[in-house]
Image (spheres, coloured by chain):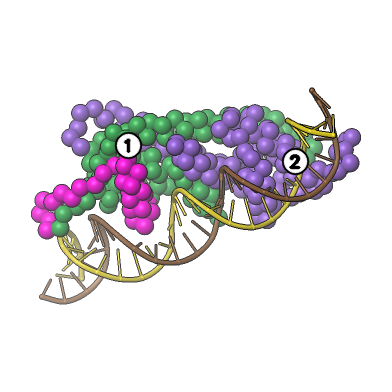
Chain colours: A green, B purple, C yellow, D brown
Amino acid sequence: MQEKYERQMKKGVLDMLVLQLLMVEKKYGYQLIMELREKAGDIFGLKEGTLYPILYRLEEEELVESRWFEAENKQIPRKYYLMTDKGRQTLAEMYQSWRQIAEGVERLMNREKNEEAGKDN
Amino acid sequence: MQEKYERQMKKGVLDMLVLQLLMVEKKYGYQLIMELREKAGDIFGLKEGTLYPILYRLEEEELVESRWFEAENKQIPRKYYLMTDKGRQTLAEMYQSWRQIAEGVERLMNREKNEEAGKDN
DNA sequence: AAATATACTTAGCAATACAAAGTATTTAGA
DNA sequence: TCTAAATACTTTGTATTGCTAAGTATATTT
C-alpha cells in the first residue's frame, strides 16, 4: 500500500541520481540499474522500463549523450551514456532543489512532533 | 527550467506534509495553504488547485475526514479536515518511505563527490 | 464602489514510475 | 549439448499527481 507513495516520492529524484552516477564515468543502461540498487539502496531497484525512458529523456534534453562502444569478448556493442556540460550544470541545480525540498520536509515533519500531544481535533 | 524538476520532486511529499499539519488539529483548506508556505518554505507555496485535490484524495482514502464548522463572524461555514486513525498510521509509513529515499539520495549524492576528479568519461 | 483577500470547486494538461511484453546475446548449469 | 538464467536494449500503455486556469461566492480594505 505504501508502495504507492514511494513511487511518487521517487519522481524527479531518479533523473538526478542517474546523472550523478554518470559524473564518474560513462556507463551503460544495465550497469546503471545495478549500481543504483547497490549504492542507493533496494528502494531504488529500477526496472529497465523505468531507466531507459529516463536515459532517452536526459539525452533529448542534452544532459547526457550516448555512444556505442564495443565491449570486450562481446559481439554486440553497448550503448554508453556520457555526461555533458549542460548535464553537469543541471545536476547542480537539481541537487539544490532537492536540498530545499528535503529541508522543508524535515523542518515540518520534526517541527510538529513536539506539539502533537493533547490537542482537540 | 529547474522548476520542472522541483515539481516532480514534490510528488508524493505533499500528501505527507498535509497529513502532518493535520496531526496537530483540524484545519481548513486555505489555512493549510498558508501554513505550508510558512512552515515548510516558499518552495511549498501551493495553489488551491493543488491542495484541494490532495484533500479530496486523502478523504477518499479515509486518511482524513471533513466536517463543516461555522466560523466566528462569518456567514458561510468552513470545511475542516480531521485526521483519522488510518491517516495517523499511514503518515508514519509515509515518513519511513521518505527517510529511506532521502537517505539513499544523500548517500549517493555525497558518495560520488570524492571520485569525481579526473576520470576518463 | 472597487480591489484584494478569503474560501471552495472543477476541468484539463504534462510529466513520470512502473508493468508488461518483445527481441537478442551471453553465461552457467544439468 | 540443451536449457535456464543473466545480460542488454526497446516500446506500449496505465495510473498518479502537481499545476494552470477558470469559475463561484463572501469578506475586508481602500
Which image quadrant: the N terminus of chain B?
top left
Q: Which quadrant of the structure image shows residue A109? A: top right
Q: Viewed as shown, does residue B54 lie left or right of A8?
A: right
User: For numbered disc 1, what is the local secondary structure?
Assistant: helix
- Residue A47, image x, y percentages: 36, 55
Residue extent of the magenta highlight: A46-75
Q: Is residue B58 magenta?
A: no
> According to the image, label 1 marks what residue?
A87
Q: Amino acid type of disc 1?
A: Gly
Task: Determine the CA span between mark 2 and mark 1.
Answer: 42 Å
Q: Residues within 10 Å of mark 2 (few under 14, many from 20)?
A: some
- Residue B66, image x, y percentages: 76, 49
Q: Which quadrant of the structure image shows residue D20? A: top right
- Residue A30, image x, y percentages: 27, 52
Q: Residue at 68% of width from left, 33% of height from top?
A: B34
User: For numbered disc 2, what is the local secondary structure?
Assistant: strand
Q: Residues within 10 Å of mark 1 (few under 14, many from 20)?
A: many
> According to the image, label 2 marks what residue?
B28
Q: Are marks 2 and 1 in contact (CB under 8 Å)?
A: no
Q: Amino acid type of disc 2?
A: Tyr
Q: Residue at 78% of width from left, 45% of height from top?
A: B79
Give the chain of mark 1.
A
Q: Is residue A42 above or below residue D13?
A: above
